[in-house]
Image (cartoon, rainbow, N blue to C red):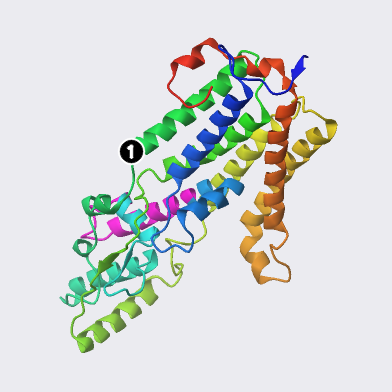
Amino acid sequence: MEMVGFVPEPNCGRGTLSIIWACLTTIMFVVWTAIHLDSQRSMSRVMWGFFIFFVPEAMPATAIDQLIKAIRLQKRLRALRDWKSWTLKQSFLIVKRGVRELGGGEVLTACRLVELAEQQQYMEENHGAHGGGIHMGMLPSDDAIDLRSKKSWFEKMLAGGQALWFCANVVSRLASGYPVTPLEDTTIAYTFCGLIASVAWLRCPQDIEDPFEVDLEVADDAAIAAVECSYSTAQDSSSSSRTSCPVTAPNGLMMGMVCVVLGLFAAVHIAAWDYPFPSAAEAWVWRCCSVAMLPLGLLILFYGDRCRSKHWSLAWTAPGLVLVRLALLTVAATSFRRMPLSVFDTPDWSGYWGHVGK
């Protein structure tokens, strides 16, 4: 197998810089457009971008978790009489901490919303009282949410087109017998994470910086106290076996789907097991790190909360996962100093799809 180093941009085919440029732009487009931050956030979008760059599995894991919570919230509210038209987008807004009480009050959580909505219906049905709870008309509609959402369908289409071109290009290269570079292999893993997150967040409002404010109605204090007392008694007697907050309770489906994402991310890297790296040391670093990232990710997924509250912590596990990711990125970058010549050949069709890079 003929090996070469740096290859300048040819008239036909591709060079070293075009491969690097295509990979970096694809990662940037997919990660940047897929991020959906909470309204009450502790880190900026740039900081989240850096975090996702080193721990890309966190993005689809978060998206899947929030999608399941939003679906649960929608199902729970639609079971009430006056909430039949409650949408998934509105549920996402609540899950993303996008509504708070008037005057900069507390954030309206999913559990609190369900409690207030059920309380309002109970008061109306049993006592004819209005106020002290919440009704659907008090919350923002889909149109109001869209006005504040900073989503750009042009950006999403641009990122999606670039990601689809990149995936199709890699698949066509493998089908035609052309090798794929380690950096392209890593980019495919990032692309999968971004696309999974984008699908899960498809109905989620993006980057709502200022939360909506809701003025909770309050009726006569004495009447409300009496109604709440009877409501609590009824809830205790009819729901004693029910969890305190079924919307945010742990979910086996979410854990299973995140396991699939972790396995897929590791499998994409393991697929480059037999790639002709410049040295045996780099080959074994790639192989060991590709295998190690799955158990490290599963350890954080299943035992993260338990580890933080017991005798030992994640002080070594999370940095270990970051070091594994850095090692893979380093090997992917250094592999360009000596690559198979066929890496720079391209399938005939790839030049006809609009994209960035070659």
On whether residue 73 falls in the magenta region, the answer is yes
Please, what is the dominant secondary structure of the magenta stretch?
helix
Q: Residue 78 vs residue 52: left or right? A: left
Q: Which residue is mark 1?
A: 153
Q: Residue at x 33, y 76 (%)?
A: 234
| Position in image of residue 96 (x %, y %) | 39, 58
Q: Residue 115 vs residue 82: left or right? A: right
Q: How many marks?
A: 1
Position above or below: 1 against 79: above
Position above or below: 299 against 5: below
Instruction: Give whichever of 257, 195 is nearer the camera.
Output: 195
Furthest toward the bottom, the residue is: 222
| Position in image of residue 56 (x %, y %) | 57, 46
- Describe the element under mark 1 as helix, strand or loop: helix
> Magenta residues?
63-88
On whether residue 269 falls in the magenta region, the answer is no
Q: Residue at x 22, y 87 (%)?
A: 221
The picture quadrant where one finds residue 353 is: top left
Amino acid at dot 1: Trp
Position above or below: 100 against 59: below
